[in-house]
Amino acid sequence: MITSTHIQRKGDAALLSKELRPLFLRRSGFTLVELLVVIAIIGTLIGLLLPAIQAAREAARRSSCTNNMKQWALAMHSHHDAIKFFPYHAQRKNNPETNTSNASPLQRRTWVVSIWPYMEQLDLYSQWNLNDNYYGITLAVSGGQTNRSLIQVKVASYYCASDRPNARYATARTSMNDWGNFMARVNYSVNLGPSQAYVAGKRQAPFGISASGGVSIASYVPYRTKLSDVTDGTSKTLLLSELRFPPRDDVDDMRGCSQMEPWSGWFTAASPPNSGTDKDVSPFSGVSLCDGTIDPSLPCAPVSDNVSLKQYVPRSRHPGGVNTSFCDGSVTFVPNSIDPGVWQELSTMNSGNTAGDW
């Protein structure tokens, strides 16, 4: 039975609901000002966190690069233990010290191939034809790959993660008849001394050239070194460092072409890391094969047809310096701010001088 009391209560409830409805509606969402404040806060947090995230990623990449460098340094020592020498930085005969003629067959290769067996790349080395060029197409074993194919294999330890993993040399230069094209680049290089690639009468770095008349394959004689030759101290003499790649594969730039004998795969300490100007020359046209115009942070200048004028300065994409290894197998990050004289002294193995602090 509905009484007047029920009707009154129902009316009161309806009236209360009507009075409260605007309040509920006002609280159903954010105002424009509140949204802008939230967006501003989120943007500020992102701005604060992004550099930290990027720094953490670079730290991980640099750590990976350090590990690669350590592998190369230990492999160099394993080669020394087995052969009693560090490898030639480049060679065109199986024993250049006793046979320097340009007669066929040419057995051209760089230190990268010599180190393969000690870098867990025995499969690649076992297929390599030691009596053919690095761009050769003669099979070494039945069912194996040609040398030209083997230098195209992209090995993870070739690459610094801060640069361009899987980079290659992919220009189509008709003057080269396509030999060497598509080879995998390598971020790591060996030490040829404090100035240019060759200085007459000087045998001053763990890797180098004892005689040269130019960049042609007939006019240079490489030398190899024992640890006992490093009289300045193995912990004070550079063994390896980084080189940077050009920003694109199709750039006619030899930097990082560490399997193309003898044009790359080495560095000189002519300038501190990530400074100065690299110098190069084409063995065919006399034109520079490093292009500093497409990346100003990789400056380069052409030089005449003389290996004594060539130089590649260690460079990396790590902020502040480059990873290096020393002849004792240790790996160190060398800052760009190192004194030029100290840097050059660290690149010599027998000067008799003491490198300063850095």
Image (spheres, rainbow, N blue to C red):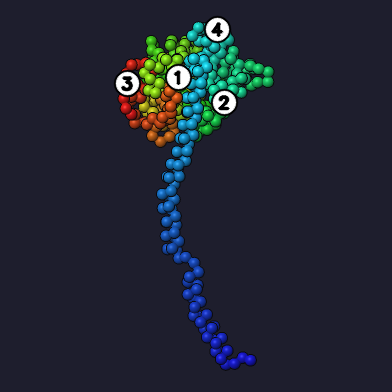
The answer to which quarter of the image holds residue 148 is: top right
In front: 107, or 3?
3
Indicate the amino acid at tag 1: Val
Residue 251 screen position, x and y as percent: 50, 28
Indicate the amino acid at tag 2: Glu
Of the residues under marks 4 and 1, which one precedes in the sequence? 4
Camera-side mark, 4 or 3: 3
Camera-side mark, 4 or 1: 4
Residue 84 screen position, x and y as percent: 49, 15
Which SS class for mark 4? loop
Q: CA distance from mark 4 to mark 1?
A: 24 Å
Q: CA distance from mark 1 to mark 2?
A: 34 Å
Q: Give the residue drawn at x 49%, y 18%.
A: 80
Q: Given the current orientation, which residue lies at the most extreme bottom position?
A: 4
Of the residues under marks 1 and 3, which one precedes in the sequence? 1
Which SS class for mark 2? loop
Q: From the image, tell me which residue sits under label 2.
A: 120
Of the residues under marks 4 and 3, which one precedes in the sequence? 4
Whether tag 1 and tag 3 are in contact, CB under 8 A, the answer is: no
